[in-house]
Image (cartoon, helix red, strand yellow):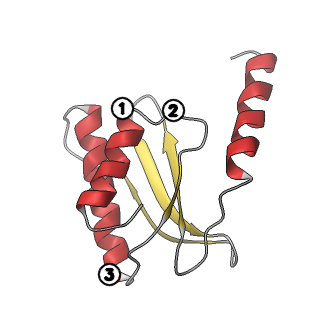
Amino acid sequence: MGKVNLNKKIAKKRRISSHIRGISTKPRISVFRSNRFIYAQAVDDEKKITLVSSSSVKMSKSKKVDQAKQVGLALAKLLKEKKIDTVVFDRNVYVYKGRVKALAEGLREGGIKV
């Protein structure tokens, strides 16, 4: 990845994330997607702490989209245990389709309002 592309990626992330803030009652769900795995964490931006997190690292070998949905469901379960039912979705620089969309749908299926 060249320097120009990296600068565009950073600018896009700042542009998107500048409008999204999470609090303890309504945390921000931050998504990171690598070539093999997908990671999601609920962040309280006021206290600057991660409340819960989930990833596809230890999941069974299946389609990446299915793994992303399972990560969303697992994260929803953890959020329910913390009595959180509403979140703000931060997709970072990723387009809302494929694995990112599947993760959000998994959160919704788990009973979390996104």
What kind of residue is marked 1? Gly
Question: Is 10 positioned to the left or the right of 114 in the image?
Answer: right
Q: Secondary structure at mark 1?
A: loop
The reply to whether discs 1 and 2 touch (Cβ–Cβ < 8 Å) is: yes
Q: Nearer the viewer, residue 99 or 57?
A: 99
User: Which quarter of the image is occupied by the N terminus?
Assistant: top right
Residue tagged by mark 2?
95
Position of residue 62 measured from the top left corner of the image (x, y, whole percent): 19, 34
Which circle marks residue 81 in the picture? 3
Name the residue at the bottom extreme: 83
Residue tagged by mark 1?
98
Q: Quadrant of residue 81?
A: bottom left
Position of residue 17 measured from the top left corner of the image (x, y, whole percent): 69, 50
Q: Residues within 10 Å of mark 2 (few under 14, many from 20)?
A: few
Q: Quadrant of residue 5?
A: top right
Q: Is residue 57 visible?
A: no
Position of residue 28 measured from the top left corner of the image (x, y, whole percent): 55, 63
Q: Secondary structure at mark 2?
A: loop
The reply to whether discs 1 and 3 touch (Cβ–Cβ < 8 Å) is: no
Q: Residues within 10 Å of mark 1 (few under 14, many from 20)?
A: few
